[in-house]
């Protein structure tokens, strides 16, 4: 199948934003099957992975996972392993295939939940476990990112950290304290760096504790 010139133009624009310091592992077609229909030959997501098998983009504000077996913070199969960080979220993370994340660990996914559009891109907020549709399909999501990445990604936070000599490393995420979902965060937060898998496990425990509570509830964080 001949790639669409419009899609190729999108991917070229995206590739121009990638961090050249991160060299992803080779593309593995078997791992692309984790995406389900979106990873089939000839689809936009498959073409994206064939062109660049995952990447850090927009000053490392966005991380696209790759069709490879590892490392575990980059490979699609390992990242979506139910026995990995997802286990800390319990049923909150069920039914999603995660394929990208922002620097604070919020996930982008395809939903396999009943009633959800299969091609739509969902944003999964990891501090709360709340999910919402952000684009009807991958190409629309890419267009939104390319049009104004700072509107949907923490580009400014990373730029400010870079000015202070702090560089987010592959396999790590930004972590805010107090959590961004808390009222206390309105008075300011301290932003640090943490191993991505450990940060996700922490957020999973946080999300499960607050998921059933109404807005404004007070909680005591209990971290296992």
Image (cartoon, rainbow, N blue to C red):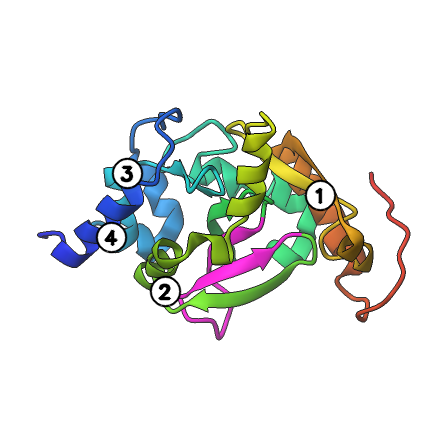
Nearer the N terminus, badge 3 or badge 4? Answer: 4
Nearer the N terminus, badge 1 or badge 4? Answer: 4
Nearer the N terminus, badge 2 or badge 1? Answer: 2
x then y, percent, for residue 216: 84, 68
Between marks 4 and 2 in the image, the one whose residue lies nearer the viewer: 4
Identify the secondary structure beneath mark 1.
Answer: strand
Between marks 1 and 3 in the image, the one whose residue lies nearer the viewer: 1
Residue at mark 4: 10
- Structural crowding at the residue carrying mark 3, measured as other residues with C-alpha within 10 Å and reported as few (<14), some (14–19) or many (≥20): some
What residue is rendered at 30% in x and 60% in y? 139
Instruction: Please provide the residue range marked out in magenta.
Output: 106-126
Residue in the foreground of this view, choosing between 125 and 72 = 125
Q: Which mark is residue 211?
A: none
Residue in the foreground of this view, choosing between 139 and 86 = 139
x then y, percent, for residue 186: 76, 57
Between marks 2 and 1 in the image, the one whose residue lies nearer the viewer: 1
The residues tagged by marks 3 and 4 sit, at their Cα atoms, a distance apart of: 22 Å
The residues tagged by marks 2 and 1 sit, at their Cα atoms, a distance apart of: 31 Å
Residue 20 versus residue 183 in the image, above or below: above
Between marks 3 and 4 in the image, the one whose residue lies nearer the viewer: 4
Query: Which quadrant of the structure image shows residue 93?
Result: bottom right
Q: Is residue 35 magenta?
A: no
Residue at mark 2: 119
């Amino acid at each position: 199948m001949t790639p669409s010139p419009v899609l190729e133009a999108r991917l070229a624009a995206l590739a121009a934003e990638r961090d050249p310091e991160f060299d992803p592992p080779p593309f593995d077609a078997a791992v692309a099957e984790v995406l389900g229909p979106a990873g089939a030959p000839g689809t936009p997501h498959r073409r994206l992975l064939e062109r660049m098998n995952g990447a850090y983009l927009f000053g490392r504000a966005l991380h696209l996972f790759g069709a490879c077996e590892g490392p575990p913070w980059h490979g699609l199969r390992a990242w979506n392993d139910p026995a990995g960080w997802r286990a800390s979220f319990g049923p909150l993370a069920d039914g999603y295939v995660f394929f990208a994340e922002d620097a604070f660990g919020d996930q982008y996914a395809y939903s396999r939940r009943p009633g959800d559009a299969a091609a739509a891109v969902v944003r999964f907020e990891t501090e709360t476990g709340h999910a919402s549709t952000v684009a009807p399909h991958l190409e629309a999501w890419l267009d939104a990112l390319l049009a104004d990445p700072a509107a949907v990604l923490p580009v400014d936070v990373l730029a400010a950290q870079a000015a202070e000599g702090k560089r987010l490393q592959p396999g790590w995420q930004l972590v805010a304290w107090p959590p961004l979902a808390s009222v206390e965060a309105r008075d300011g937060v301290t932003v640090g760096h943490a191993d991505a898998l450990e940060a996700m496990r922490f957020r999973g425990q946080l999300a499960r504790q607050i998921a059933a509570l109404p807005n404004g509830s007070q909680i005591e964080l209990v971290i296992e």
